[in-house]
Amino acid sequence: MIELKINGQLTKLDVSEDMPLLWALRDVAKLTGSKYGCGKGICGACTVHIDGQAMRSCITPMSYAQGKSITTIEGLAEQGDHPVQQAWQDLKVAQCGYCQTGQIMSAAALLANNPNPSDADINGAMAGNICRCGTYPRIRAAIKQAAKANKAGAQS
Amino acid sequence: MIQKISRRKFLQSTGLASGTLMLGVQFSPLMAKTTTPNSFQPDVFVSMDETGQVTIISHRSEMGQGIRSTLPLLVADELEADWNRVTVKQALGDAKYGSQNTDGSRSVRKNYQKLKEAGAIMRTLLQQAAAKVWSVPVDQVRIENHQAIHQDQRLDFKELVKIASTLEVPARDALTLKTADQYRYVAQPNMANIDGHEIITGSAVYGYDVELDGMKYAVIARPPVVFGTVKSVDSTETMKVPGVIKVVQLPALTPPAMFKMLGGVAVIAENTWAAIQGRDKLKIEWDHGANASYSTQDHEAVFIKALEDPQEVVRSRGDMAQAQSAAAKTITADYHVAGLAHATMEPPAATARINGDRVEVWACTQTPQASQRNVMGTLQIPQENAANVEINVTLLGGGFGRKSKPDFVAEAAFLANETKLPVKVLWTREDEIKHGYYHSPSYQKLAATLDAKNRVTSWYHAMVNHPISATFDPSARTAGSTDLGQGDMMFEVPNIKIALGETDTFMRIGWVRSVTNINNVFAASSFVDELAHAAGQDPKDFLLQLIGSDRTEDFEADGFKYSNYGEPAAQYPAETSRLKHVIELAAAKAKWGQELPDGTGMGIAAWRSFLTYIAVVVKVSTQGNRVKLEDVHMAVDAGQILNPDRVISQMEGSLIFGASLAFYGEITAKNGVIEQGNFDDYQMSRINQIPDVHVHLVDSDAIPTGVGEPGLPPVAPAICNAIFAANGQRHRRLPMKDLQLV
Ligand code: FES
Ligand code: FES
């Protein structure tokens, strides 16, 4: 049994220590919002937050996740209204949408650490997330919009 | 199975309504609504329940092109429905909807009329029902936003459903359809993506995400070489992996490959990880078969030889020899585009369950009906029992043609039947890259003559590749058609020869987004640029001149049987004025002709493909072997635009898809085995390499055409032409491995 916090809930999963977190989330905890794209840490589709940091769950073994606090796309915001999610909706970023949960998790972590990212900061944080459909220009625009919304929110 | 409000129902029907799956999953209020059986269904595409809730069927697959957010607009608009009272439901595979093949950029043009009619039929019946209630002539009843109106009286649709359902369905030619200026949803710039909220909250269900009660997970060790077979398998170590349940050998594949299973050995387990580990531990001895003789590198010589004397002449005009002897200049160039894989972000996945004599399937398929036939073929289910095979279509995490080949669906059905367990077959990324239906490597020879005034007097374009048809008929040795980007060129030249070379095929070949337009338009549009420079003219002006006079292209006159994407030429003529217009539009928006700093350049390319006219202008800056895409303008004439935002997003996607294949896309085989396997050796462009893409839509009242594919063909040549303008380097081979996209 491996114990960890998933989206705020203490959870025990009966999985082996070497199982990547991605498969434990998807197949055992039945949280399928985190996606498989490469299994090697090179596409970002599986991105989750581990103790607040964006990480690739496909190459994170359960032995590492043990005792940590995991946030998946399902737990990013109760109503799915995190500023990043809202900006994504507004600008209709998604095409097929498959990569977008990973993109959103990477973007949310970026903004949490850097509320006002430059283009270079966005590139740096998001270059690990592939979108085969090609939504990059909208991802960039949505991150900027979310940053603005955050600022407005903080001022009011 | 995707129905906007029915994920909950989906979970119930699969026995998973409660329990861990709900953990953390948020439902929007819309999703919480329940449906009652719909009593009023005057057309297969639309029905209404007693509360007035409208259900519109999406019979085409959603793979990112936005079809679920587009086709229903036509029905709702004609019906004058309140969009908030519309549910979009994904169709099962069923011939009653007509073709459901979501490929060829044809969902819009094939369904535009009949979906308008579906909405109008229901609207007409509701109008007649209201006239009956009020005892007034039908033409005194107005229908507006889910209501019938007569003077100051109003009735909601829900109050008319019962009566309307008793009336006779009107004939299609008796319907009054809306004109473009009457649309409220169609053509609006800001219609929401119907699956948008599910996507951003992670609750959208893709093929990879299907969960059934008691379901097991399977991965398959497929023969490394197509038509290879299993000589022996030792699964002792595999069975020791905790969670592994079973090892099942699949039947060997025999030619033709079609959509049949590739064969190999499946490992079925309690979770994906156990299945992957179990597969790693299989000890399989393979017989690689005849295709092990094939190596991409060695075959290049065969291709090039085949190109010297291409036997199949498909389009010919004038007298090439005469043009040659009268020429002031003769220019030739050879081009090559490497093999390509689809690399859909979601690899193929399918789930099947055997339920008595029924087979239920959930899959990210572009072709539910072909999937159904494929399952029937695999399990030897006779045609009369077709209704026993139920194909539920999930969302697709990208398609690009890969998911119109339902080999993976057959695998799931086979394994479910063998084990009598619900089984989800998951392809890993390596599986997807190594066992695909590839875009063939191709070789092309272009030649042209110029007269003393630098006018083009002849055009020659020969191409050789492994034909797609070989996947279905192993005796096929040429592409068979030059309709996609080769014979369909719209240049006003007195002498023309378009030809195909022959070769054998050693792997599964399949259509990838825009098919042979990728390589043909790359070669032709690069060559036009080469000719412009040889003539000392501006490439944009030269291109416009080459297209020449305003006319409807008459391909038949050159003895060319052009399929025109399956549409009559009279209805969808190839018009040079439209092609020239997008060129001028893109050039003007990009400020073509402006002074640019050293090392910076602009390139242009334009083509009509899938009946849509597209021009692309790319600006690049270069520094040594480093290339930066600075700016992109795309002009699109796709007739009437039904969902502008989704058209724009398809263009953005095409640019990025094109950048990936221009700089990275290369599938190679060695001894029959594909050498690439993941995004490290089959790379994709990344966010830091992509500029903003400016898309300009031509306002048109022509019949709408598709946009999923036609944006792609001009992208790579526009990039290459821009690089030439920037630094004088001509790139005739894709991918440009010696360059670094920054
Ligand atoms: S699936 Fe984890 S990075 Fe690709
Ligand atoms: S939206 Fe399809 S891969 Fe990103």
Image: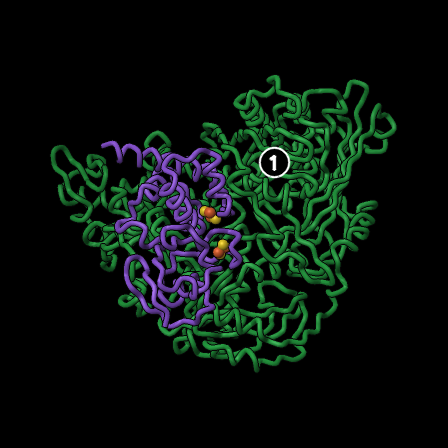
Chain colours: A purple, B green
Q: Horizontal and vertical percent for residue B243?
A: 45, 76
Q: Horizontally, is A69 left or right of B48 in the view?
A: right
Residue B183 or residue B270, whichever sits in front: B270
Q: Horizontally, is A95 left or right of B662 in the view?
A: left
Does the beta carbon at disc 1 come under 8 Å from ligand 2? no
Q: Chain of mark 1?
A: B
**Residue B173 visible to the viewer:** no
Place residue A87 in its image quadrant: top left
Q: Quadrant of the N terminus of chain B?
A: bottom left
Q: Quadrant of the C terminus of chain B?
A: top right
Place residue A140 in its image quadrant: top left
Three-letter code, disc 1: Pro
Q: Is residue B644 above or below residue B549?
A: below
Residue B252 or residue B269, whichever sits in front: B269
On the image, numbered disc 1 is attached to which residue? B714
The residue under the point 44% across, 52% down is A98
Q: Is residue B49 above or below residue B522?
A: below
**Residue B635 visible to the viewer:** yes
Residue B178 or residue B442, whichever sits in front: B442
Q: Horizontal and vertical percent for residue A15?
A: 41, 71
Q: Horizontally, is A127 left or right of B387 in the view?
A: right
